[in-house]
Image (cartoon, rainbow, N blue to C red):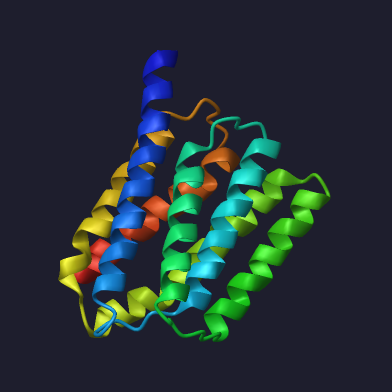
Amino acid sequence: MNNLKNWLNTASGVLGFLVTFGFGVWLLRQSGSQSLNVASWVMWTLMDGILVALSIRGGNKKPFLFIGWTLAALLVTAGMLFNGAVWQIGFVEIVSIGAVILSVYFWVMDKSEKGLFACAVAMFVAGLPQIASFWNTPATGTWWLWAGTAFVCTLSILGSVKWKSVHNAPTISSFVYQIVVLAVLFR
């Protein structure tokens, strides 16, 4: 059973990287029609990186999904910077940055469980404008990103060694978010 869990966990990281990086490449290729906000991607890179640190501190020695997301977001951010993406810091970025700062505070204070919950909230809040945008203008061509991310979240949860809800809070939050986005896209 441990071999299966290891395989599922590793697969979630590899596929999580590929799905996120693939979306980033797609965005960069579509840059004429997409509003590329590098501030959002920097925020996602920071949140994912903090999730890696909080997970390790909380006892998850193999947070492969978060590592995959972090590496992909970092590469996409670099690509956006080289392609002249804009910096737009709005309400959502400010709220998310606040939750990230709270996550870091809990990390420093060795309260990784609270930090994981704070990061899960930050991730969900950061994605709310996307749901609102899709409500008005569904981008059904992006379905593969949301479905793929829901799939890798499922792999990560099934491959989880610790079943405490706190260890899976960010992954479960992300899974729920992906399903909500898919429901909005195809309503």
User: From the image, which quarter does the N terminus lie in?
Assistant: top left
Say left or right for 174 vs 161: left
Q: Nearer the viewer, residue 47 or 84?
A: 84
Task: In the rendered view, tell whether residue 167 sits above or below residue 108.
Answer: above
Q: In the rendered image, which quarter is residue 61 located in?
A: top right
Measured as percent of width and height from the top left, residue 7 is found at 37, 24
Q: Nearer the viewer, residue 83 or 141?
A: 83
Say left or right for 121 vs 142: right
Residue 186 visible in the picture: no
Residue pushed farthest right? 109
Say left or right for 41 vs 109: left
User: From the image, which quarter does the C terminus lie in?
Assistant: bottom left
Q: Residue at x 45, y 42 (%)?
A: 65
Q: Residue at x 20, y 77 (%)?
A: 138
Task: In the rendered view, tell whether residue 11 sits above or below residue 141.
Answer: above
Measured as percent of width and height from the top left, residue 18 is found at 32, 48
Measured as percent of width and height from the top left, residue 13 is found at 41, 39
Residue pushed farthest front? 82
Residue 59 visible in the picture: yes
Measured as percent of width and height from the top left, residue 80 is found at 42, 73
Task: In the rendered view, tell whether residue 2 sits above or below residue 149.
Answer: above
Q: In the rendered image, which quarter is residue 176 located in?
A: bottom left
